[in-house]
Image: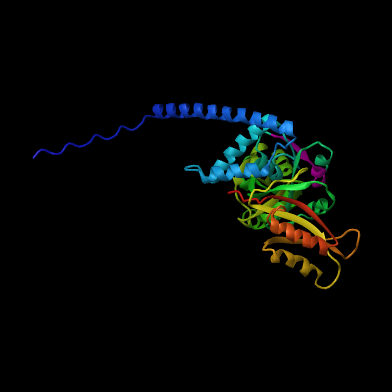
Amino acid sequence: MPRPATKPEAEKPSLASLRERIDEIDRKILDLLSMRAGIVEQVGQLKHSSGEVVYVPSRERAIYERMIAENPGPLTAEQVKRIFTEIISACRALEHMPRVAFLGPEHTYSHEAARMRFGSSVEFVPESSIAGVFQALDNGRADFGVVPVENSTDGTITLTLDLLIDTSLVIIGEILLPVRHSIGSRDGDAARVRKIVSHQQSLAQCRGYIAANFPGRELEAAASNAFAAKRAAEDPDCAAIASTTALEANGLRVIAENIQDLATNTTRFLVMGKRPSERCGADKTTVLFAVADKVGALHEAISLFARNGINISKIESRPLRSRPWEYIFFVDFSGHRDDPRVRRALKALERKALFLKVLGSYPEGRSASA
């Protein structure tokens, strides 16, 4: 019997034909980006005429979440977010080029956090201190500020909390940045390293790695990891611990990456602004308050949140500078100040506290992938 006819195998596309398809898709993407930018310009005109702010964290958060939810792959959720961060950043600049102050210099983790939140199409304003970031907003040199507030390994940055007490600025967002340390030198030769330079906290966070891989080497603390990278670029026998970006920006070769002792090492940054953030549905609120120095006063204040079904995620105390041995309390909890249950809790707390200050309600941060 004659064999049944077999179907011919489908011809595989050639490299040239695939590139032609990519070029066609790129043209469509460009057309859509131009269309989006044109609509954003119209939005900017409407905002300008009505006095509305250009940067709306809740709106941008909604865009990211929608795109991630609708992502069919193969791009990861984090890759999609980064792409749309830059698209939004470029389009936002058509309305107004925001100035973002951060704890400098460039290529620090604060700079990386600011870029992660605002994208590249902004004017970055490096400041030499956390207080300088607050001052930049106060005197109009910046529209927004990014400051570190706590690290999962080293704890709270008390200077930031102290500055929050008296400022008129508000928290409008938070950034959770995984801290991924790398070590590098001019030639990338680990055997040649005689000295390791980094910020004091980074040296502490990599203590185990250094002991195992560079025993007996001299350690030198620097003002920042970015300064450490510059120092290593000047000395062939010196290595720096910093982000891979900072190392490469200073012409250093990476010896090893992800050398932090704890894989979960994360720094939380606050985004400071002048106008409150709108509700997004996944919000966090930060307040500070003081209570009378009597038995049960703090318990009574904290219990108000539980009565209203509000979860407290963090509580921190700081000395009340004007009254020795008395304290103010910083509290982070779920919800927005405009939520009915949060309004009830804050109104009750205001009656019991010596004073109460709402530092801001803002979209709750989510940790980026490594």
Instruction: Give coordinates of residue 234: x percent, y percent.
Output: 72, 38
Q: Is residue 324 left or right of residue 184?
A: right
Residue 158 visible to the viewer: yes
Q: Quadrant of the N terminus?
A: top left
Q: Nearer the viewer, residue 269 or 95?
A: 95
Q: Position of residue 268 (x, y in %)?
A: 69, 52
The front one of 15 and 244 is 15
| Percent x, y of residue 148 | 73, 49
Q: Which residues are magenta?
A: 122-134
Residue 123 among those drawn in magenta: yes
Q: Nearer the viewer, residue 297 or 117?
A: 297
The x, y position of residue 220, in whole percent, is 75, 50
Colouring scheme, one of rainbow, by chain, secondary structure, one colour: rainbow
Question: Does residue 317 show up?
Answer: no
Q: Nearer the viewer, residue 19 or 210?
A: 19
Residue name at image x 63 percent, y 53 percent: 260
User: Relative to residue 316, is residue 66 drawn left or right?
Assistant: left
Residue 227 included in the magenta stretch of the image = no
